[in-house]
Each structure stands twice: as C-alpha cells, then as structure tokens.
Image: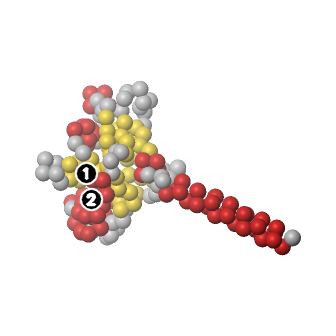
C-alpha cells in the first residue's frame, strides 16, 4: 500500500510540474505583438489604416541596449525633456519600447488620429505618460517626437498622433516608446 501511495504521489507531482512548465512556456512565448494593440478612434478598419508592432524587433532591441548604456535623457534628447515636463518627473522610466509599422494612412481624409493603445504594462486611469515616436532619418538615427498620452479605464492609453507623424511613419522605419 505504501508503494502504491508513493507511486501515486510521484505521478501527481510529475503532473503538477508538467502543467506548471507548460504554463510557463506559454507565458514565455508571448511577444510584444501579443500584448500590444493600437486602434484608431472613429475608423472601422475598412479604410485600410493600421499601426502594428513590427514583426522584426531587432532594431528596437539594439536601440534599447543603447538606452540602457546612455540613459533615457541622453538617448531621447529634447523629447526626453518634453516628456519629463509633461509627466512632472526628473527621471524617465521606459515602460514599453518597440518597432512599429503603419499603412493605409490618407491625410486627405484622416488628419490627426486619436489612438487607443494597450500594452503589457497597464496604466492607471488619468495617469499621464508620454508616447515618444522615433522616425529613422537619412543618417540612420531616430528623430524623436513627444506626444502626450493619458491612461484609460481599461489600462490602456489614449494619444493624438499628428498628421505629420502619421505621414512620416508610412515612409520610414519607426520606434515607439512609452515613458513616464
């Protein structure tokens, strides 16, 4: 009887560990694309407009290493100063950082767009954070623009993306950072 109980206990433990390992593997396989959504208010999707997390995140990972080495203030430059002023902080925290792609923008019919974004990081309703958009220039560096964002009831952010940025996103590589 003791052998049977021991075997059952070992089987139960093995099953528990296997279930835990499977759950951990599922969580580990989530990517920034799995945890991020970007939707334009007032558009139905039939317009063909989209902003998505780029499939290739190598450039974002390389730039994140530069941020870690130089610090957010140095890396983002003037955009960091504008972000710190908006969120009323002396030290920026980078909550999210990713490469993005955009398509289907039509300046004649769309103008500036209010975007609702959700990320792995939840934000409090009313929380002020800055969305920094970096557009790659001809030299391969990124020119950063600071946009003011506010946390929403669902843990996401609302931000107005300007026509100029939306047009630049169509023709260039771009990075998006959420800082506070």
Where is 165 relative to 67, above or below?
above
- Image coordinates for residue 68, horizontal then vertical, percent: 29, 67
Which residue lies under the disc numbered 1?
134
Q: Is residue 147 visible?
A: no
Q: Nearer the viewer, residue 78 or 12?
A: 12
Checking the image for residue 63, the label placed there is: 2
Where is 6 relative to 36, above or below?
below
Q: Is residue 142 left or right of residue 18?
A: left
Tag 2 near tag 1, CB within 8 Å: yes
Q: CA distance from mark 2 to mark 1?
A: 11 Å
Which of disc 1 and disc 2 is earlier in sequence? 2
Identify the residue at horizontal 34%, vertical 45% (top origin): 54
Q: Is residue 107 left or right of residue 121?
A: left
Q: Nearer the viewer, residue 134 or 126?
A: 134
Checking the image for residue 115, the label placed there is: none
Identify the residue at horizontal 30%, vertical 53% (top origin): 58
């Amino acid at each position: 009887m003791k052998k049977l109980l021991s075997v059952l206990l070992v089987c139960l433990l093995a099953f528990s560990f296997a279930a835990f390992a499977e759950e951990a593997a599922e969580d580990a396989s989530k990517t920034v694309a799995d945890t991020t959504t970007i939707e334009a208010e007032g558009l139905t999707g039939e317009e063909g407009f989209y902003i998505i997390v780029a499939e290739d995140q190598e450039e974002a990972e390389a730039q994140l290493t530069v941020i870690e080495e130089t610090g957010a203030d140095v890396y983002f430059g003037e955009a960091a100063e504008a972000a710190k002023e908006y969120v009323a902080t002396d030290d920026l925290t980078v909550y999210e950082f990713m490469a993005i792609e955009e398509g289907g923008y039509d300046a004649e019919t769309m103008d500036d767009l209010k975007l609702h974004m959700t990320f792995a990081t939840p934000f409090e309703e009313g929380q002020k954070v800055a969305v920094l958009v970096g557009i790659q220039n001809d030299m391969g560096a990124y020119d950063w623009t600071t946009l003011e964002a506010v946390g929403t009831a669902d843990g996401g952010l609302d931000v107005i993306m300007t026509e100029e940025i939306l047009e630049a996103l169509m023709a260039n590589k771009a990075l998006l950072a959420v800082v506070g």
